[in-house]
Image (cartoon, helix red, strand yellow):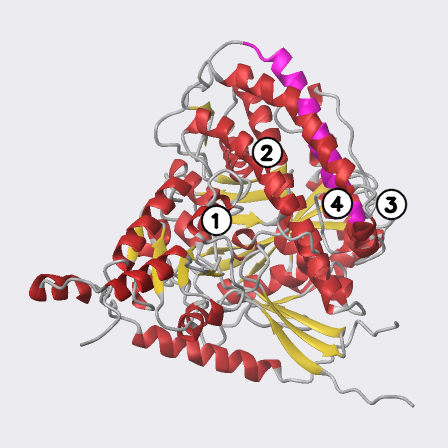
Amino acid sequence: MILALSGKEVAAELEQNFPGSVVESGENSILVKSESVFAIAEYLKNTPELDFSYLTHISAVDYYNYFELVYQLISIQHKHSLVIKTRCYDRQNPVIPSVVKLWRGADFQEREIYDLMGVSFEGHPNLKRIALWQGFEGHPLRKDYL
Amino acid sequence: MEVDIVTPKHIYSDEDLDRTEGQAIEALKKSATEIIPDPDRWLEEELERNILLTSLDSILNWARRSSLWPAICFPACCAFEFIAANASRFDLSRFGMEILRASPRQADLMVTAGTLTWKMAPQVKRIYEQMAEPKWVIAMGACGISGGIFRSSYNVVPGYNHIVPVDVYVPGCPPRPEALIYGIRMLHSKISQRRNIEG
Amino acid sequence: MAIKTEPFVLNIGPVHPSTHGVFRMRATLDGEVMIDLEPVFGYLHRGVEKLAEERTYTGVIPLTDRLDYIASMTNNLAYVVAVEKLAGISVPERAEYLRVILAELQRIANHLIAVGSFLNDCGAYFTPFLYMFRERERVIDLFEMVSGQRLLYNFMRVGGFNQDVPDEFFPALEKFIRQMPRYIDEYERLLKENEILLARAKGVGILPKEVAINISASGPVLRGSGVEWDLRKVAPYSVYDRFEFDIPTGTVGDCYDRYRVRVIEMRQSLRIIEQAMKEIPAGPVKSDVPQLIRPPVGEAYGSIEAPKGELGFYLVSDGSIAPYRCHIRAPSLLNLTALREMMIGWKIQDAIIIFGSIDITMGEVDR
């Protein structure tokens, strides 16, 4: 059985190593600051007790004031899972560090979020539109598109 | 053989290719707002002049309709009903249609099996233009007729008749292979009344 | 005397003579060997996620059918499992067993097409394909008896099913289960030690274990590379923890391993269906769910082991009758991440086989 790790315990550990990066932590998920996403993800992947080697899913949601990105992580060796969230309050030009160097599965998913939501990823080697064509105006999945 | 897999070795500029493709799609999207009228001029001619076909016409029409070769154009779900119509149970080769030509220059029928998106539209138009005359189009499924369940989406063309002229419409989502065979038989009867020799 | 060669670009697709859909690859070739590959998607992007925000929760079910249009029951199941997790709805026992039976039948139907089109790409032009379609028609007959449709069923509902299966279903299912192993034996006899298949598929397109985990692969692609990860065993949903079945894994991660994994999975599916048929209880098939479902404010991620991999739905609800956000985790898109790495260094004929062995459906990749 996959055990969902408690957000509060992992948040305490993250706060020790990266002070100031955890905004809030609930039972199911941890909300972190968008600048420290890459550092925290690297820590979660490389620490042997946590060993989150499998990135299941990255998703982006448009709440009118901010964009929220949700990362679902799983450890195949220890069989536990965790959810990390981050928010981006800039609507004109949202930028979030990319995790492609850690998990290559994020490649197409981040390109799709850039294409449909307009969130750019810093450090992505090939950030182009994937589902729509170059020259398409706008980002369709935003709440204010048509 | 040892190949470096990290650095891309494009010898073309992929931004240029993407940009020209995007411009072609935008141009087609602006120009394809009207529905191309269905080619049914033969109906009016028939009624006006009360033509009887010559026996040469009948032989040519019989030859054409008995071996229609479909071109491959398989975007989406209807493709699997078309393939099932070709497979062991509903056998399309009894109508002479078992050869699915990969090259459109050797085909004369285009069965549009799937939803058409604006990104795919220029490619479908190119395939239609590459087919040699006489050629026919069957619009298969609800997505082919009017956009279907996806009609209000930002990327879906509301029906193939914005891009190519359509001869037979087969409704269904997806249409059963029996319905598709009925549509093909309707196309056969349409072909058998075609006037080939002028004058 | 060395011959000087010059690389050139070949555009494969979007319309090409294999049955995998509208997928385009810009391949840079040096002679016949590939040195670079760039996949281009989006030719079937229909905007399903945007359309789902305008429909009620039950109204999204026909849209989910059209994602992976070959295996439509498991798409419905993934979405319904996610909505039930979001709203906290439980499902009666008989409905759970029926869900398992229909999902495993769908897995058999999907793997028949996957194996058939893989062999089609290998050069056995249409013969195994027609054999597999003969069996697939029997499974489709069973589904037509249950739901009335041949391809896109729209059959699962939040809370179970709208109506029970008809009386003829279980005798027909019993007959199918007794006859199917003989057909799989027939395929094995023709194909397992076939020299041409071994020469073309063994050692071709290797995906190592660490790379498979890093690219978030799932399904037969991950299991073919040697990772024993199947959501039906690791995180059982529905009543899968009551059945006994094995998880086949490959050793090397080449095309031949993925093909073997799919054939063995078909046999294991028959085993699960047999056990489920014996234990299925009588009773209601739908729990008491209102007509318009209004889940509480929150979010949920529900996933199942679909035939192509892990299919998941991330749903966000704001208390109204339509989902606020419905994001689909498509297994085919993630399995394609390592395409470039798997194909570079091979000839162009091998590239078609490698692409066929991953088994994708463009409706899922593009959504």
Residues behind callouts 3 and 1 on a single chain: no
Above or below: residue C170 compared with residue A56: above
Q: Is residue C193 above or below residue C156?
A: below
Foreground: disc 3 or disc 4: 4
- The amino acid type of the residue labelled 3 equals Thr
Question: Label 4 is placed on what type of residue?
Answer: Tyr
Residue named by callout 1: B93
Of callouts 3 and 4, the N-terminal one: 3
Chain on which label 3 sits: C
- Is most of the magenta stretch helix, strand or loop? helix
| Of C250 and B174, the residue lying toward us | B174
A86 vs B133, left or right, is right
Amino acid under disc 1: Ser
What residue lies at 87% left-to-right and 45% top-to-bottom?
C251
Which residue carries the number 2 mark?
C135
In the picture of the structure, the residue carrying the numbered disc 4 is C259
Q: Residue C68 location in percent, x, y? A: 54, 46
- Label 4 resides on the chain identified as C
Disc 4, SS:
helix
**Disc assigned to residue C251:** 3
Residue type of the residue flagged with mark 2: Glu
Q: Nearer the viewer, residue C257 or B133?
A: B133
